[in-house]
């Protein structure tokens, strides 16, 4: 298993490549899949995220019935990749996601969800 630092480095390197594919940074939609998705706009990459999420679910369901679990990893990689394109479009990075996960570390998921509901209700009242 890769260390967290190595994983973050790999994500940062991929994020830098994706960033370089933005048309504003010289990315060519005719020559780059990433540049083409970014050039087409959110509808294009958000559709891909939906497709890839569905493929993750299907791979997991297949694994429940004896299929190769490695297919889940393959599909999650596709999902993460397309999510990283969305992050780049919105000028966000994998580091932002990691920071949010670190912020949540040690917090009960049940408590976190309850807190979000309270904050949402307070926002409605104001």
Image (spheres, rainbow, N blue to C red):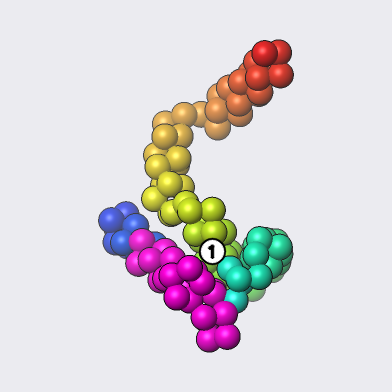
Disc 1, SS: helix
Q: Report the magenta residues as a range.
A: 12-35
Which is nearer the eye, 11 or 106? 11
Give the quarter of the figure containing the C terminus.
top right
Which is nearer the eye, 19 or 24? 24
Which is nearer the eye, 17 or 61? 17
When asked about the image quadrant of residue 61, the answer is bottom right
Rendering coords of residue 32 (x, y %): 53, 81
The count of marks equals 1
Give the quarter of the figure containing the N terminus.
bottom left
Relative side of 26 to 123, left or right: left
Q: Is residue 26 visible?
A: yes
**Residue depicted at x 55% and y 32%:** 109
Check disc 1: other Cα within 10 Å, few if <14, some if 14-19, many if 20+.
Answer: many
Is residue 17 rendered magenta in the image? yes
When asked about the image quadrant of residue 7, the answer is bottom left
Q: Is residue 52 visible?
A: no
Relative side of 67 to 85, left or right: right
Residue farthest toward the bottom in the current orientation of the protein = 31
When asked about the image quadrant of residue 69, the answer is bottom right
Vertical comparison of 105 with 48: above or below: above
**Residue depicted at x 34% and y 57%:** 8
Rendering coords of residue 99 (x, y %): 40, 42
**Residue depicted at x 48% and y 76%:** 27
Rendering coords of residue 23 (x, y %): 51, 72
Rendering coords of residue 14 (x, y %): 40, 68
Read off the residue under disc 1: 85
């Amino acid at each position: 298993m890769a260390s967290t630092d190595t994983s973050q480095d790999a994500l940062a390197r991929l994020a830098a490549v994706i960033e370089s594919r933005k048309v504003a940074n010289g990315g060519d939609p005719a020559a780059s899949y990433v540049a083409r998705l970014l050039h087409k706009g959110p509808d294009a990459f958000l559709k891909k995220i939906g497709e890839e999420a569905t493929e993750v679910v299907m791979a997991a369901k297949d694994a429940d019935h004896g299929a190769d679990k490695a297919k889940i990893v393959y599909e999650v990689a596709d999902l993460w990749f397309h999510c990283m394109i969305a992050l780049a479009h919105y000028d966000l990075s994998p580091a932002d996601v990691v920071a949010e996960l670190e912020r949540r570390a040690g917090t009960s998921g049940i408590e976190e969800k309850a807190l979000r509901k309270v904050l949402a209700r307070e926002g409605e009242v104001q």
